[in-house]
Amino acid sequence: MERDGRQVEIWDVRSVRFTDAYPGPVRVVRVRERWTERKRVDREWKTEQKEQNWIWVAAGDLDGYDGAAIRDTGHLRWKIENNAFGELTQHWHLTHCAHHHPVAVLALLWIKIIAFTLFHAFAILHGKLFRLGKVTMQELAQADLPLVALRLADAIFQRIENKDRQTQKRQKSLEAQAAERFATSDP
């Protein structure tokens, strides 16, 4: 079968006894993926055969899902791990918290996650160099991230304020129209 441009072979073994600590059966899905990767070396394009082998152990009632769905879910989980948690710990210093009060730890965690999300949203939506593949996220992050994040937050807040002003103007206009109709109507 073909998935995501790769030739995929799936072996799906259900109801495997895994360990004494986990009393229920588990499901083991083994996947071999093969594909051809094209890359530029010097001034020439070269093709290279690639292969990956994956083994996923799934617990719980997943009988309604085939091995391909387990494979897709596993890949999505690794994508989250690599793109979010990996980057947060490697480039956003998520591993150490300078404060130890539970509320402070949670507040700092949320601030970092919000900054991370705003930065990536900005880079993906407005970063022409990133979209063209001329610069990596890491290079963008090393630019002046606090300034970029502050400008983005400021732009978002300005949009919210503008929408609030427009809503207030519209509301006042509707109220004035209603008052005018009421004043000119016969009792």
Image (cartoon, helix red, strand yellow):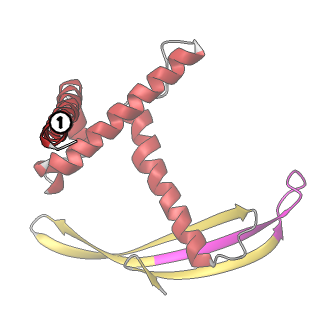
Range covered by the magenta-colored residues? 16-33
Q: Is residue 44 magenta?
A: no
Asked if residue 8 can be seen in this view, the reply is yes
Residue 183: image location, x then y, percent: 15, 36
Quadrant assignment, res 166: top left
Residue 26 falls left or right of residue 142: right
Residue at image point 20% right, 50% down: 125
Residue 23 falls left or right of residue 60: right
Residue 65 falls left or right of residue 53: right
Residue 93: image location, x then y, percent: 41, 27
Residue at image point 13% right, 57% down: 132
Residue picked out by circle 1: 179
Q: Residue furthest left?
A: 43
Q: Nearer the viewer, residue 18 or 47?
A: 18
Q: Amino acid at mark 1?
A: Ala
Q: Nearer the viewer, residue 178 or 173?
A: 178
